[in-house]
Image: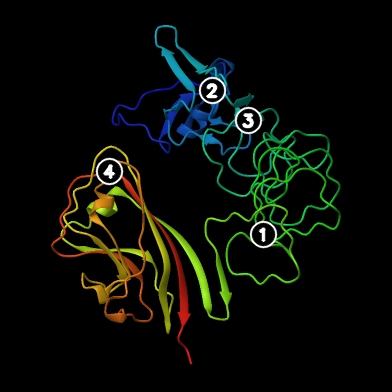
Amino acid sequence: MPKIHTIATDNTITGTDKLLGSDGAVGSANATRNYTMSGISSYVLSQTDTNTFKTIEVAGQADIVADVNADTLTLVAGDNISIATDASTDTITITGINTSYTAGDGLDLTGTTFSVDSTVVVTSGAQTIAGAKTFSNTITGSIDGNAATVTNGVYTTGDQTIYGVKTFDDVISGDIDGNAATVTNGVYTTGDQTIGGAKTFSSTIIGSIDGNAGTVTNGVYTTGNQSIYGVKSFPDGIAVPGFDFTTSFGSIEEAKVIITTANLISLNGGGNYTLISSPGSNKMIVPISIVAFLNYNSTTYNFSEDLYIGLEGLVGANPEQYFTKVRSQLVNSVANKFEYAPQVFANDHIEVGTDTALVLHATAGNNVNTGNSDLVLNILYRVVDLTT
């Protein structure tokens, strides 16, 4: 190795500076030679006790090469990595941060990947859901497919007991066995029932039938007008509360009128109580016979005057204005009392009119404020038709 001599005139050595030195040969062979800095550098780096790395290589990455003499290599910690240095021991410790993960409810953890557990109901995508699911609120949206079971629903197959009223908008197709608990608009075989509308029976009705028929075919009605043909034999006497028949001289009718306490007291100071309604246009009521009966209760009336029977609007206290009268002695009686009230023909005539009701009349001066008995009038009369 040649010896290096310093240059007294220049303290700075550059790469192009030359140094003087001996080649180290023995004797006369020793010579002085010039050496440059590049040659010295190559020599120093080639020695075995001065091993160094100029280039840092990482597979798949760009090489890190020292740019200048005494360049600095910087180590940077990445995610989940920590780097610690110890200057006293000249050591660098690189540590990976190991974080432990645990899957929560409804989650799966495979490696470092989280996913939704298969038992959780997702909001989108197709999914098969097993087990009973209870929804506390109404389900909004379209539900396709068939439910495995139906709670309180009607099944399409199998036996089933169905409770409650069921309304079918269309005709039921198929065989229906058993008995309905109730029948809408149907006739029951037991129990009371009101049946409306005309019912036609193709066979004879067997059993007892109570009540009244709405209509009778070829029968005698108990109310209303009716024409009866053929000879009718009655083994017993005919008893009717009133009758109405037409003869060649007009219609003859009978009426039983019960005048209550309230109606009689209402005649205080005058007024009318209708006994028979108006017969209609061009028709007139003509009494034939009137029987009055006081059905005494407990308190006597105190009528101050008689009561008159005549046509409404015409009747008054004058004889020519009324057919007959009910005397105050009758209505003021202290016991049951009958009285036949014949017709009165004062001055050989009575004022009459058509389309006029028959009334019980109290004059304006008639006063009454006590009494509690019914007055019953049985009236036999004609309805005369004056139509020409």
Name the amino acid type tagged 2: Thr
In space, the residues marked 4 and 1 are separated at their CA atoms by: 45 Å
Q: Residue furthest top?
A: 88
Q: Where residue 274 appears, x then y in whole percent?
A: 34, 64
Q: Quadrant of residue 147?
A: top right
In space, the residues marked 1 and 2 are separated at their CA atoms by: 122 Å
The residue mark sitting in front, 4 or 1, is: 4
Label of residue 372 in the image? 4
The residue mark sitting in front, 3 or 1, is: 1
Whether label 1 touches label 2, CB < 8 Å: no
Q: Secondary structure at mark 4?
A: loop
Name the amino acid type tagged 4: Asn
**In terms of sequence position, does the residue under pointer 2 or pointer 3 come before the other?**
2
Q: Secondary structure at mark 1?
A: loop
In space, the residues marked 4 and 2 are separated at their CA atoms by: 145 Å
In space, the residues marked 2 and 3 are separated at their CA atoms by: 72 Å
